[in-house]
Amino acid sequence: MNLSGGDPTGVAAEAVFRTVRTGNPFEETVERLLSAIRLGVVGHGERFPAERELAARLGVSRITLRDALRALQEAGYVESRRGRSGGTFVTYVRPRPSRSEAQRVLRDAGTDLDDLFTHRRALETGAAVLLAEKGLTPEQEDLLGDRLEATEEAEVEDYRRLDTVLHLTLAELTGSASLTRALTEVRMRVNDLLDAMPMLVRNLEHSNAQHGELVRAIREGEPESARRAVREHLEGSEALIRGFLS
């Protein structure tokens, strides 16, 4: 698996597979690996990077990494395969969308919607406005354009992953690792709710139109237009989630 910025999943991978810094490396390693699965950085049937590479990226020993992978295997998220093409593969299958599943996800998250949505708005609005104010380099414009195009052309089953990458790209382009990490964590919780809901093609078309306006505002250096585009986009997502949970 290529984790470089040229891979469409590279932005999310960089945010998830970062150095473990807490006093409990085992628990945080498990959390990082789970994040990779839940964000779609490593999808169903795909293989995690080799142990040596992944341990180096996370800054943990291979023993700690193996213990974390073993815990995920026991929980039914991954499986280990031997042989030349072996490794650790994701076996987790998301539950079928349902209102009860979405309610369970919210309950297990230990937070309320107002808190989650306020945090997300602050992060995403701040990133978009900052980018519109400071401008993009030609390389950054190309990257953002590629992410937008990938989302617009995505099949339904791959839409959420590429949508996530587009949003995380905005955070990455600010140059703030802290902002990218924070948005990654928030996006993971939002995705857990969205994954429990059916995907509606009309909603995706509307979302793509809003993405296009947001990217245009950033490229043309219009902070207020960028602010409005983020607000309208997130309000739509929030209304969808609230309506489904009610």
Image (cartoon, rainbow, N blue to C red):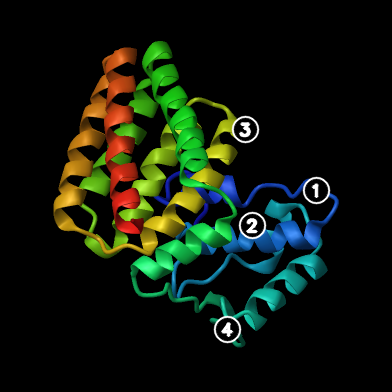
Q: Residues within 10 Å of mark 2 (few under 14, many from 20)?
A: many
* Secondary element at tag 2: helix
Mark 1 and mark 4 in contact (Cβ < 8 Å)? no
Q: Position of residue 73 (x, y in %)?
A: 64, 80
Please tell me which residue is depicted at 30% across the width and 57% down the height of the picture. Answer: 244
Q: Quadrant of residue 15?
A: top right
- Mark identifier at residue 22: 1
Q: Is residue 155 visible?
A: yes
Look at discs 3 and 4 and give the one toward the viewer. 3
Q: Quadrant of the C terminus?
A: bottom left
Look at discs 2 and 4 and give the one toward the viewer. 2
Which residue in the protein does label 4 denote? 84
- Cα separation, mark 2 vs mark 3, equals 16 Å
Residue type at mark 4: give it: Arg
Q: Residues within 10 Å of mark 3 (few under 14, many from 20)?
A: few
- Cα separation, mark 2 vs mark 1, equals 12 Å
